Amino acid sequence: MAVKCIGLITSGSDAPGMNPAVRAVTRAAIYNGFTVKAVYRGFKGLINGDIVEFKTQNVSNIIQQGGTILRTSPSKDFTTPEGRQMAYENMKAAGIDALIVIGGDGTMTGTRIFAREFDVPCIGIPCTIDNDIYGTDTTIGYDTALNTIIDAVDKIRDTATSHQRLFFVEVRGGSAAGFLALNGGIASGCEECIIPEIEAKEDQIGTYIQNGFKKAKGSSIVLVAETEETGGALQYAERVKRDYPELDVRVSILRHLLRGGQPSAHDRIIASRMGVASIDAILDGQRNIMIGLKNDQIVYVPFAKVIRNVKPIDHSLMEILHNLSI
Ligand code: F6P
């Protein structure tokens, strides 16, 4: 059956760049003759029938806005077969025959389950500050979050230097991903960076202390990716304070700050490219794939591949951080 009407959803955690992606999907769809139905509040909106037709003017003046005008929300109901059945019925009642879903890894997983159960063509667009999605070099929102990290750390460094303090700065990173912390650490010249990919195997802070961090500089900044594996910045600060009472230690937790703000130029551009690519994919007869970027080229990645694989972090980046922070 030829697709005529596309449902558009933003789901999971918001990320800067969701709005430019919503704009691109809407405009590219209308340009190619599709009807667009926007679903509000993620999959919850599909279950509740919170669906509105979008024209080009619905996405005017949003390219520069953070967050998502479609809103987003977790949906426990969508994890149940009954909830997904309800979502399918509402989707059909609204005349939607394909879905484009913008979100992170959890969103891709939920979309794949739905696509298989109901045989609905679904296209995913990777959008999360965490950059932890397999099959794409980068996700929408990651670049803006990195820029927010460097802005925050530059400011923290002013006070850390003035007071000669050791700061633990906590960023988020998804379930077990240190992309934000590691590249944020390189970009802001941090002295150390604790990420789950390494911390799960070795006591990073122990090594850092043994290497004599306190002798090297008057002040130091350690970026910590908060996850179950790392435990977070407060825990490290407590340990260092206990073992080195002479050190002046402080903690700054950035967390949700990283999810806000105007999308960077890079995020606006990739959101626009991926949004257009999602409509091209529908025109190509693609289904159940995520749009990715590999070596700056658009690629189609089957959901199964996205979900089964963990995106590896480049460990040589840690060496770069260490070598440059002597
Ligand atoms: O995906 C972004 C993110 O901030 C993750 O790093 C974190 O695990 C998750 O969202 C937490 O979201 P919330 O606090 O909104 O539940």
Image: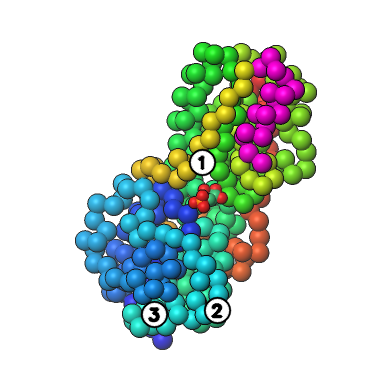
- Residue 113 drawn in magenta: no
CB at mark 1 closer than 8 A to ligand 1? Answer: yes
| Three-letter residue code for mark 2 | Pro
Q: Which residues are magenta?
A: 231-247
- Left/right placement of residue 168 relative to residue 121 reads right
Image point (63%, 15%), residue name: 217
Element type at marker 3?
helix
Mark 2, residue position? 81
**Mark 1 or mark 2: which comes first in sequence?**
2
Mark 1, residue position? 255
The x, y position of residue 215, in whole percent, is 70, 14
Spatial CA span between label 1 and label 2: 33 Å
Label 1 neighbourhood size at 10 Å, few (<14), some (14-19), many (20+)?
Answer: some
Which of these two is toward me, 64 or 75? 75
Spatial CA span between label 3 and label 1: 35 Å
The x, y position of residue 304, in whole percent, is 61, 69
Q: Quadrant of the N terminus?
A: bottom left
Can the viewer see residue 231 in this picture? yes
**Mark 3 or mark 1: which comes first in sequence?**
3
**Mark 3 or mark 2: which comes first in sequence?**
2
Element type at marker 2?
helix
| Three-letter residue code for mark 3 | Asn
Mark 3, residue position? 90
Label 2 neighbourhood size at 10 Å, few (<14), some (14-19), many (20+)?
Answer: few
